[in-house]
């Protein structure tokens, strides 16, 4: 690793800058394979340029100075796990050609045994996910509220982030309607800090003891084990309609937030209120926010459904491709800071209730640092699957609060890793190793990879010269905030936790018209998938306590009567910050498809592709066949997608180069993109191809120019709005 190499050195300041764009990300091998099977022995190839393994620190947190690839396989020759070279791995050891296999075949037994044990239990929730390495650089603006070292000015900290869905199994589709996990591991000098959040700022339940209930209700039905990775079924709606504290979260899930366009375009939230303490010991209550530089964008429901079939790995691929192409995704970490008073209620909002937000209009989000994801993992299992987050991974200056949901999580995350990662030493897995020295007196256990010296893993001792010594605050020891605690033991909740509808209404009223329509459609779809009329009706009663118009729309779609509210519908102010629509955003990493064939002006296609890539986006040429397009004296154009291998859902905009020969699949591509309110462009006589599809070429967001550059300028401006919102039947503005 050299400091001059920003991709290799994840913590170098330059690593935040963009790497040169590759035109087509996603090639699986670091070197192009030869046509014939290679026969010349050689060392394994290095990882791809966009990939980095975890930092080379020892199991107990010391920098080792070992090369970063020291944990991957080495040597040119096939060996056993013990390093014995092997001449053959295709035939088991048999008594003669046709004889039975011999028990003495140690290679067969080792190979098959290891294979038999390759799987570990998937996460009980958030099983489906993907990860990336990056760096967090602090602005220093948080030092007024916390002494956390990684939030001091200009400190850079390596991070690993894992994004996930909640309900689906490990192999489920990425684009299902669900909450998304957004978990960040900061490898700080003071120990590891994990911020284990979601893309939705509130949760279904107010108390951790109900977590098994909500998850059992959301997971597939236990009898037939369907449906996979979705909430559109009876048991989910049975639970949330009886358990109305879920209403606010359900509204977020049914909104466009439940189907993000990309992990790169999601906000992240710590959900709970945390307590920060400054160097003088003054504490504040805070909410953590991640704000994506690319803005918050979502899919439309039909796109999400198509993608679940055509590209179940859509979000995983999108993140890896963007990083590989050098369009490094970035988020600003922000804080909402509230006073730490004994009530822990701010402007009537109970800060210990995780079903409530504090509107940004009331308490603005103050940016405190920037996170850049700049490297893909080298090995999914070793890194993304084995990473272990835990809310108890805190650093001095950050404390939990008494939010009863947070309190239970403090127990659950350590507990779950014991089964999932096979014992108590999971902190020694390379991805989980702290970057701070570890002297914890823990010993032995399954998979112990540290070699502990000394004879006295206890305190006090004299045999190991008293080591390790307690660390007071003067040497950055973690001292809990001395919050007074009192009260009679009881299984109860404060009365303020009884308000289940006011913020659901605030969220609904804050959405634009088109977003409300999407939300109503989502409720109608999900409840329409339930079999039990009673559950649909019961849920309509819940909606009636939030908004009468919404209830009427959903009831009509279900063919049921719309009930009236049973409570007085709360009078609330909208929070405009909750709407995703109405602002332009950068287009970095967005994907433009260029439809071309041999009749297109290929020199212009190449120039357009280069201009798009130079502007930080991806440009993929779509043609009727694979290989290259060639005509006349122009350089051949490499085809990245054929009309058969792609679908409109891969692209944020589609442009047509000239007038390619009409084909049904080309129509489908354009018609679908148009229906999903994507920008459509055409140049060099594209109007014929476009009008043949059946939509008006003067429709909003359809840009036709003779000249490609003029067209591209307008296409990119429109893409900044994410979609051509006017094309939806109900639209803003
Ligand atoms: Fe989790 N959650 N959770 N959760 N959670 C897990 O930990 C749990 C909750 C979140 O990418 C598990 O390692 C309880 C809220 C994320 O590896 C488990 C409760 C929020 C991830 C667990 C909650 C989250 C998890 C499963 C109720 C948002 C994925 C595997 C009190 C603030 C982390 C694992 C990753 C994972 C328990 C509620 C976020 C079982 C008991 C609220 C992002 O420990």
Image (spheres, grey):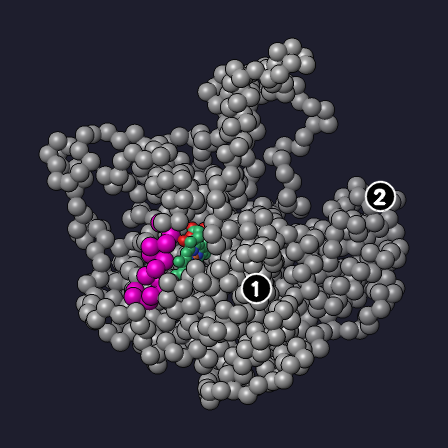
Q: Which image quadrant for residue 358?
A: bottom left
Q: Of residues 540 and 251, which is closer to you in this image? A: 540
Question: Is 530 inside the magenta-drawn segment?
Answer: no
Residue at image x 53%, y 17%? 103
Q: Quadrant of ligand 1?
A: bottom left
Q: CA distance from mark 2 to mark 1?
A: 49 Å
Q: Position of residue 320 (x, y in %)?
A: 57, 48
- In percent of width and height, residue 121 lies at 48, 44
Question: Which portion, as a residue range, is magenta?
Answer: 401-414
- In the shown orientation, is residue 544 left or right of residue 273? right
Residue 170 seen in the current view: yes
Q: Residue at x 70, y 53 (%)?
A: 310
- Of the 4 image quadrants, the one containing the N terminus is top left
Question: Which quarter shows the C terminus?
Answer: bottom right
Residue at left offset 22%, top offset 51%: 476
Q: What is the magenta segment's predominant secondary structure?
A: helix
Q: Which residue is mark 2?
A: 630
**How many labels sit on residues?**
2
- Numbered label attached to residue 231: 1
**Residue 404 falls inside the magenta stretch:** yes
Left or right of 190? Residue 212 is right
Q: Looking at the image, is mark 2 or mark 1 nearer the viewer?
A: 1
Q: Position of residue 600 (x, y in %)?
A: 85, 53
Query: Nearest the camera: 204 or 179?
Result: 204
Sequence order check, earlier mark of 2 and 1: 1
Report whether residue 575 is seen: no
Above or below for 377 versus 185: above
- Residue 542 % position (x, y): 52, 79
User: From what the image shows, is residue 164 above or below residue 354?
Assistant: above
């Amino acid at each position: 690793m050299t400091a001059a190499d920003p991709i290799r050195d994840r913590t170098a300041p330059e690593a935040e800058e963009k790497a040169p764009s590759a035109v087509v990300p996603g090639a699986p091998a670091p070197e192009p394979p030869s046509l014939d099977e290679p026969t010349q022995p050689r060392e394994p190839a290095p990882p791809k340029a966009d990939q980095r393994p975890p930092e080379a620190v020892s199991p107990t947190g010391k920098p080792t100075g070992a090369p970063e690839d020291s944990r991957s396989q080495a040597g040119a020759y096939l060996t056993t796990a013990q390093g014995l070279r092997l001449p053959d791995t295709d035939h088991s050891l048999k008594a003669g050609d046709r004889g039975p296999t011999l028990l003495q075949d140690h290679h067969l037994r080792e190979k098959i045994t290891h294979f038999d044990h390759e799987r570990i239990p998937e996460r009980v929730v958030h099983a489906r996910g993907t990860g990336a390495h990056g760096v967090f650089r602090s602005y220093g603006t948080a030092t007024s509220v916390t002494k956390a070292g990684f939030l001091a000015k200009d400190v850079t900290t390596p991070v690993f982030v894992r994004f996930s869905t909640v309900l689906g199994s490990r192999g489920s589709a990425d684009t299902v309607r669900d909450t998304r996990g957004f978990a960040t591991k900061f490898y700080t000098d003071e120990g590891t800090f994990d911020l284990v959040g979601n893309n939705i700022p509130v949760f279904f339940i107010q108390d951790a003891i109900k977590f098994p209930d909500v998850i059992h209700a959301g997971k597939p039905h236990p009898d037939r084990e369907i449906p996979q990775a979705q909430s559109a079924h009876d048991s989910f709606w049975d639970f949330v309609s009886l358990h109305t504290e879920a209403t606010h979260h359900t509204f977020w899930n049914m909104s466009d937030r439940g189907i993000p366009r990309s992990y790169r375009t999601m906000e992240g939230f710590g959900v709970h209120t945390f307590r920060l303490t400054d160097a003088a010991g003054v504490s504040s209550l805070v909410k953590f926010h991640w704000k994506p530089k690319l803005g918050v964008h979502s899919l439309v429901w039909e796109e999400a459904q198509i993608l679940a079939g055509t590209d179940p790995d859509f979000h995983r691929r999108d993140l890896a491709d963007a990083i590989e192409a050098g369009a490094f995704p970035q988020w600003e970490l922000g804080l909402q800071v509230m006073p730490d008073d004994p009530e822990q209620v701010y402007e009537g909002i109970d800060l210990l209730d995780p079903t409530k937000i504090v509107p940004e209009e009331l308490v603005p989000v103050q940016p405190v640092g920037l996170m850049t994801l700049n490297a893909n993992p080298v090995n999914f299992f070793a890194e993304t699957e084995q990473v272990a987050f835990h809310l108890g991974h805190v650093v001095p200056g950050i404390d939990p609060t008494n939010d009863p949901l947070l309190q239970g999580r403090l127990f659950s995350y350590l507990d779950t890793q014991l089964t999932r990662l096979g014992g108590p030493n999971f902190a020694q897995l390379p991805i989980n190793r702290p970057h701070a020295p570890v002297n914890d007196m823990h010993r032995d256990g399954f998979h112990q990879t540290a070699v502990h010296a000394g004879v006295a893993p206890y305190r006090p001792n004299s045999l190991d010269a008293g080591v390790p010594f307690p660390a007071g605050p003067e040497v950055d020891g973690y001292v809990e905030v001395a919050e007074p605690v009192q009260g009679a033991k009881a299984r109860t909740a404060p009365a303020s936790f009884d308000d289940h509808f006011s913020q659901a209404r605030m969220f609904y009223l804050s959405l634009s018209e088109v977003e409300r329509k999407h939300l109503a459609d989502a409720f109608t779809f999900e409840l329409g998938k339930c079999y039990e009329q009673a559950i649909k009706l019961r849920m309509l009663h819940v909606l009636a306590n939030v908004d009468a118009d919404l209830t009427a729309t959903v009831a009509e779609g279900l063919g049921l009567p719309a009930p009236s509210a049973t409570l007085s519908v709360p009078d609330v102010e909208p929070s405009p910050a909750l709407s995703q629509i109405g602002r332009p955003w950068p287009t970095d990493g967005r994907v433009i498809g260029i439809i071309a064939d041999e009749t297109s002006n290929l020199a212009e296609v190449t120039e357009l592709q280069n201009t798009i890539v130079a502007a930080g986006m991806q440009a993929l040429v779509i043609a009727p066949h694979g290989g290259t397009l060639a005509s006349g004296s122009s350089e051949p154009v490499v085809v990245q997608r054929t009309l058969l291998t792609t679908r409109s859902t891969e692209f944020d905009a589609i442009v047509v180069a000239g007038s390619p020969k009409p084909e049904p699949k080309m129509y489908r591509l354009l018609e679908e993109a148009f229906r999903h309110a994507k920008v459509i462009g055409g140049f060099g006589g594209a109007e014929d191809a476009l009008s043949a599809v059946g939509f008006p070429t003067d429709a909003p967001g359809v840009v036709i120019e003779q000249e490609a550059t003029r067209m591209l300028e307008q296409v990119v401006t429109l893409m900044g709005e994410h979609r051509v919102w006017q094309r939806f039947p109900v639209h803003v503005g």
